[in-house]
Amino acid sequence: IDNLITDYIGKANRFKKVRAAICHSADDARETRSHNNANILCLAADKNPDYAIIIEAFLSTPPLTEEKYLRRIKKLDEE
């Protein structure tokens, strides 16, 4: 949780198998977790009062296993 969140995401995503994402809502958290299999949740300190709801959505959402999502994750991990 920080105000300079985009800087941290750029640095984190430089590493293989690290998929960091900014989430401003529970819907963002569910989508980035399911579609991109994000494994690091980043929250802006000045944007969200409902951190617990966003964190719960992120942690409880499984990644999708359809081929197009698996290809996307593989491509992200290869970059």
Image: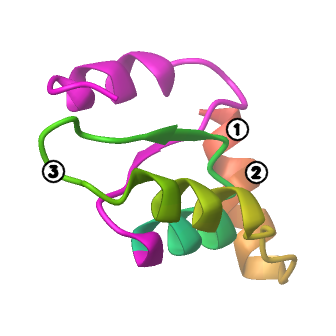
For image coordinates 72% across by 31% down, the residue present is: 17
Q: Which residues are magenta?
A: 1-27
Pick whichever, 58 or 71, lies toward us. Answer: 58
- Which residue is label 2 attached to? 74
Quick one: quadrant of the N terminus? top left
> Disc 3 on helix, strand or loop?
loop
What amino acid does circle 3 point to?
A: Lys
Tell me, yes or no, if residue 36 can be seen here.
no
- Magenta span contains residue 19: yes
The color scheme shown is: rainbow
Could you tell which of marks 3 and 2 lies nearer the N-terminus? 3
38 relative position to 1: left or right: right
Q: In the rendered view, would you say 54 is above or below 10? A: below
What amino acid does circle 2 point to?
A: Lys
For image coordinates 87% across by 76% down, the residue present is: 65
In this rendering, the label closer to the viewer, 3 or 1: 3
What amino acid does circle 1 point to?
A: Asp
Q: How far across and how far down the image is residue 7, in percent? A: 23, 21
Label disc, if present, on residue 77 of the rendered structure: 1
Q: How far across and how far down the image is residue 24, in percent? A: 29, 60
Quick one: quadrant of the C terminus? top right
Mark 1 vs mark 2, CA separation in Å: 5 Å
Q: How far across and how far down the image is residue 55, in percent? A: 55, 53
- Other-residue count near label 1 (Cα within 10 Å), few / some / many at <14 / 14–19 / ≥20: some
For image coordinates 57% across by 72% down, the residue present is: 30
- Which residue is label 3 attached to? 47
For image coordinates 48% across by 20% down, the residue present is: 12
28 relative position to 71: left or right: left
Residue 59, picture quadrant: bottom right
Q: How far across and how far down the image is residue 71, in percent? A: 75, 65
